[in-house]
Image (tube, rainbow, N blue to C red):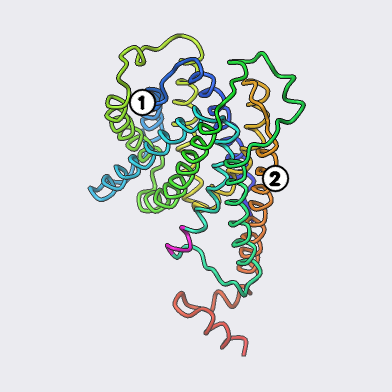
Amino acid sequence: MWSLKLTLVMLTIESLEMGLNTISKAAMSRGMSNFVFVVYSNACAIPFLLLCCLLFHRRKPPPPLTTSILCKIFVLGLISCSIQMFMYVGIRYSSPTLASAMTDLVPAFTFILAIITRMENLDLRVRSSRAKSIGTIMSITGALTMTMYEGPPVAFTSLTSTKLNGNVTLPQSNWVMGGILSAIAAFMLAVLFVFQTSIIRAYPAELMVTLICCTFVTMQSSIVSLMAEKNPSAWRLRPDIELIAIVYSAVLVVGLRSVAYAWVMRRKGPFFVAMFKPVGIIIAVVMGVTFLGDTLYLGSVVGAAIIAIGFYTVMWGKDKEETLLEDVPAHGMESSSHNVPLLQNKTFQA
C-alpha cells in the first residue's frame, strides 16, 4: 500500500509545480526570457541547497563521491537542463494548462521505459498488465487531443478578463508548437525519473545529488542562454513578478521539489512519482483561469478527461499488480531463495 506520508509529499510538490507554471507564464508574458529564467532559478537554488547540505550533513557526512557517480550526475544535469528549456518555451507558446496536460504523459512514458529497462513486466494475459497498457494508450490519446484540437471556448471562462496579464489569444501554430515542446519535456522527464532512481539508489544522498546536479544545470543553461539570448537587457531583473517567479522556482521547485523527488524515488521507484503528474491538470486549470485569464477550450476539457481516465486505469493495474505480490504466502516467501522462488514455493506447498 502507498504510504500516506509519501502521498502527501507528492501532492504538495505537484501543487507547488503547477503554481510555478502559472507564475512563470505571467512573468514571461511581461517580457522575461525563458532561457534567463532557467539560469537564474538554478543559480539562486545553489545557496539554498548548500545551506541544507551543511545543516543535514554536519554530523553524518555523505558517502564518498566517485568519478562514475559524478559523471552520471553531469548527464542528469544535461537532461534536467533540457527539460526546463523545453518546458518553459512550451509554456510561453501555449499555457500552463496545456503544459501540465503534457506532463500527464509522464506515467505512460515511464511505464514504457520501465518495460524496456525490465523494471516492469508486461504480460497481456494478466488483467493488470492489460489495464496498464490500455491506460498508457489512453494517456497519449488524450494528450494528442489537447494539442491538436482546441475547440470552442467554455462559456464561463469569458468572465475572467482582468488578471495578471490579461487574455492573450494565441495563434493555432503557437498552440501546437507549445504542445509538442511540452510533450518532449514530458518524455525527457520520464527518462530523468528512471535515470535518477538508479543514481540515488547507488549514491543515497538526495541533497548532495540535487546540489551537484543544480550546479551543473546552472553552468549548462548559462552556455545555452548566452548563445540563444542576444539581447543584454534580457539579463536585467525587475523587482516585480519576474523576481517573485525566480525566487519561487529556486526555493520551492528547483530545491524542494528535486530533493523530494529523489527521496520518494529511492523508496518507491520512478513510476510512483510519475503517477502523480495528472493531478496537476486540475490545479493548472484553476490557476490559469483564475490568475492568468486563460480561456478554457473544449479540447482541453475532453483531452484532460481522457488523460485522467487513462491515468487511473494505469494506477488501478499497478495497484492490482502490487496486491498480487503482497498476497503471496509469507511462509512461501521465507522458504524460497532469490533465484527460484516459485519453484521452491511449489515444492513447499506440495
Which residue appears at 46% of the width and 47% of the height?
A: 187
Side of 127 where 80 appears, left or right: left
**Is 291 one of the magenta-colored residues?**
no
Q: Which residues are magenta?
A: 113-117
Side of 67 where 313 appears, left or right: right
Tell me how many marks there are: 2
Q: Nearer the viewer, residue 69 or 282?
A: 282
Q: Which residue is mark 1?
A: 39
Q: Position of residue 280 (x, y in %)?
A: 61, 37
Q: Nearer the viewer, residue 44 or 314?
A: 314
Which residue appears at 63% of the width and 51% of the height?
A: 311
Tag 2–tag 1 contact (CB < 8 Å): no
Which residue appears at 36% of the width and 15% of the height?
A: 234
Q: Which residue is mark 2?
A: 305
Separation of marks 2 and 1 at Cα, in angstroms: 35 Å
Q: Position of residue 350 (x, y in %)?
A: 62, 90
